[in-house]
């Protein structure tokens, strides 16, 4: 029997992964017909500067720690072996080749959705995959590219936490234990990550 699954793909640099990431992943799992949500760790985002980007393997480890007790969440390093920077369409081409019977959907924030038409080969993405959009501060749904496969979920939790702010606070030795899963926070402290 063919193993068919509905997989939600949640892309990010996860630098570091915080409770906002896991909350959003959890939300889309329970509100949609997904068998799993895969957190795709991007080694290099073409739209982001990499001066503060932690090694990809360390970020993957933190994602694994953040979701270690959630059977429906999976950390993925699929982009690690792809050309840099990481282009979403290349990742989807790779995944659909490896898992031809899986149905993949994309989960992105409105901050990314407003510039979707600037993504490399975006037409392939919007024509072939469902894209779920959750709200981010300062990025209105009215500015998001309109297409029949793009669904804006205005009921998704509004999480105004970003990894950049967390990195800044960690560099000042602030206690952020409630912004990160305990295992992730402990890993950061033990390995002296994000310190100046």
Image (cartoon, rainbow, N blue to C red):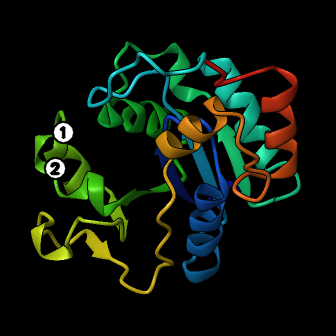
Mark in front: 1 vs 2:
2
Q: Residue 94, relative to residue 154: is it above or below? A: above
Quarter occupied by the N terminus: bottom right
Residue 15 or residue 35, whichever sits in front = 15
x, y (%) of residue 141?
Answer: 20, 74
x, y (%) of residue 175?
Answer: 76, 47
Question: Callout 1: few (<14), some (14-19), or many (20+) C-alpha neighbours within 10 Å?
Answer: some
Residue visible at 35% across and 65% down in the picture: 136
Task: Give the side of residue 132 with respect to residue 102, left or right.
Answer: left
Q: Looking at the image, which residue sits at the far bottom?
A: 155
Q: Are marks 1 and 2 in contact (CB under 8 Å)?
A: yes
Question: Callout 2: few (<14), some (14-19), or many (20+) C-alpha neighbours within 10 Å?
Answer: few
Residue at the disc numbered 2: 115
Residue 106 visible in the snapshot = yes
x, y (%) of residue 34?
Answer: 60, 69
Residue 122 or residue 53, whichever sits in front = 53
Residue at the disc numbered 1: 119
Task: Give the side of residue 148 with respect to residue 100, left or right.
Answer: left
Q: Residue 15, relative to residue 141: is it above or below? A: above
Q: Secondary structure at mark 2?
A: loop
Residue visible at 17% across and 44% down in the picture: 122
Residue 14 visible in the snapshot = no
Residue visible at 77% across and 39% down in the picture: 64
Q: Residue 12, relative to residue 136: is it above or below? A: above
Q: Secondary structure at mark 1?
A: loop
Mark carried by residue 81: none
Residue 134 or residue 52, whichever sits in front = 52
Q: CA distance from mark 1 to mark 2?
A: 7 Å
């Amino acid at each position: 029997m063919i193993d068919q699954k509905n997989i939600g793909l949640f892309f990010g640099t996860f630098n570091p992964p915080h409770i906002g990431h896991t909350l959003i992943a959890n939300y889309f799992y329970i509100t949609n017909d997904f068998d799993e949500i895969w957190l795709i760790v991007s080694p290099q985002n073409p739209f982001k500067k990499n001066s503060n980007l932690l090694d990809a393997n360390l970020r993957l480890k933190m994602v694994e720690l953040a979701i270690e007790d959630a059977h429906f969440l999976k950390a993925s390093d699929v982009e690690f072996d792809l050309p840099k920077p990481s282009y979403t369409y290349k990742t989807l081409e790779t995944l659909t080749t490896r898992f031809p019977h899986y149905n993949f959907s994309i989960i992105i924030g409105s901050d990314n959705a407003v510039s979707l038409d600037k993504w490399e080969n975006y037409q392939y993405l919007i024509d072939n995959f469902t894209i779920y959009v959750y709200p981010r501060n300062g990025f209105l749904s009215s500015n998001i590219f309109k297409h029949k496969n793009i669904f804006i979920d205005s009921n998704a939790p509004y999480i105004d936490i970003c990894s950049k702010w967390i990195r800044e606070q960690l560099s000042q030795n602030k206690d952020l234990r409630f912004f990160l899963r305990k295992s992730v926070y402990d890993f950061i402290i033990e390995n002296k990550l994000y310190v100046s």
